[in-house]
Structure formats: C-alpha cells, structure tokens
Image (cartoon, rainbow, N blue to C red):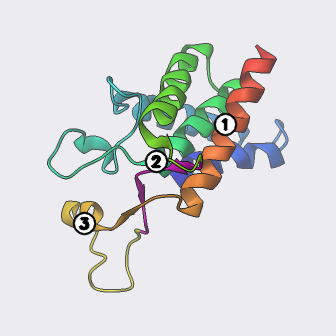
Amino acid sequence: MGWYAMAIVDVLDFLPASHRAWERIVTIFARMIQALLLVQDKNTGLWYQILDRGGYEGNYAEASASCMFVYALAKGIRKGYLTSNCLEAAQRGYAGIIKHLVEVNGYGQVNLLMTCDSVGLGGKQRRDGSYKYYIDEPVVTNDLKGVGTFLLAGVEMERLCRSA
C-alpha cells in the first residue's frame, strides 16, 4: 500500500488537470488516504506491517510503510489533493517515525529501525501472502527502501511546513 500511495500522488505530477482521468485518480487517492487514516496507530502515529491487524501478535510498526504514507499525506496536502484535515495525521506520523523508529547510536550514527527486509507475492512458493508470511520476514535496520522513503517524507514535511 505504501508503494501505491506514493505512486498515485507522484503520477499526478505528470498528468495535466485537464486529463480525463484526473478527478478519478484524485478521488481514488483521497479515498485510499481516508482508509489509511483509519488504521494509523492512535498511540504512535505509525502504521503496522499488516495494516488492518494492529496489535495482533507478531505485528509491528513498520518504518518504510510509515514513511511512504507520511510522504503521500504531506505531498497530497501540499499539492491540494487532500484537505488540511489530514495535516494532523501527517504530523503524528512523522513525529512517530522520529520518536519510535529513529535512533542515534553510540557513534553518533543515525539509524532507521524496523523495516521489513523484503516481501512480495508470487514466485517462490513461500510467498503466499498469509499473515504468518508477512510477520516472519526479517526486520532490518537502515534498509534502503526505508531510509530512502524516510528522506522523501522528511523533504515533503519540510516543504509542507514552508508552504503553510
């Protein structure tokens, strides 16, 4: 869902507002965001690896998805695709990332924690899409898809704050 959220908000940069599917794409994006807000963790502001199973055994707040959702929220607000009532969710998400998923180690290095190493569907028989499959995948620190989306989320939050 994180990749989809980022792709949908980014594709709008390349379509003119006069495109026949423009309004439909914006509507799909806004509806998806509203669904994501329903599963944002109330305590941390983050999103779980299995979005609709927050609090279930083995599920955890996942860094790359949380960063992707904050990016999509912030960019969507800044570009006017989302209403400003989404701002609080973006701010809570970003604050949650900083508080719960970023650490500075004893050497002064900044690390992004809790990124799922790799998931997908199809191919190998073990990629069955089950709950167990998703929670059993390795969780790593400083995975590039996590760090990259953390940087994107930070840039969009900064741009959003400057445009407000």
In which image quadrant can residue 22 be found?
top right
Q: Which mark is residue 142?
A: none
The residue tagged 1 is 154
Q: Earlier in the sequence, mark 1 or mark 3?
A: 3
State the mark number for residue 63. 2
Mark 3 or mark 2: whose residue is earlier in sequence: 2
Residue plotted at (67% across, 36% down)? 154
Farthest residue toward the left? 57
Residue drawn at the location 67% of the way across and 45% of the way down: 151
Q: 10 Å neighbourhood of mark 1: few (<14), some, or many (≥20)?
A: some
Residue extent of the magenta highlight: 109-118
Of mark 1 and mark 2, the one earlier in the sequence is 2
Badge 2 marks a residue whose secondary structure is: helix
Q: Is residue 125 left or right of residue 164?
A: left
Is label 1 in contact with label 2 (beta carbons under 8 Å)?
A: no
Quickly name the residue at label 3.
Answer: 136
**Was residue 114 drawn as part of the magenta stretch in this picture?**
yes
- Label 3, label 2: how far apart the Cα atoms are: 16 Å
Q: In this view, which residue lies farthest toward the front?
A: 106
Image x and y of residue 48, in percent: 34, 44
Looking at the image, residue 120 lies above or below residue 112: below
Image quadrant assignment for residue 30? top right
Label 3 crowd bin: few (<14), some (14–19), many (20+), radius 10 Å: few
Name the residue: 55% across, 26% down: 90
In depth, the one of 114 and 110 nearer the eye is 110
What whole-number distance in Å separates the C-alpha atoms at marks 1 and 3?
29 Å
Identify residue type, mark 3.
Asp
Residue type at tag 2: Ala
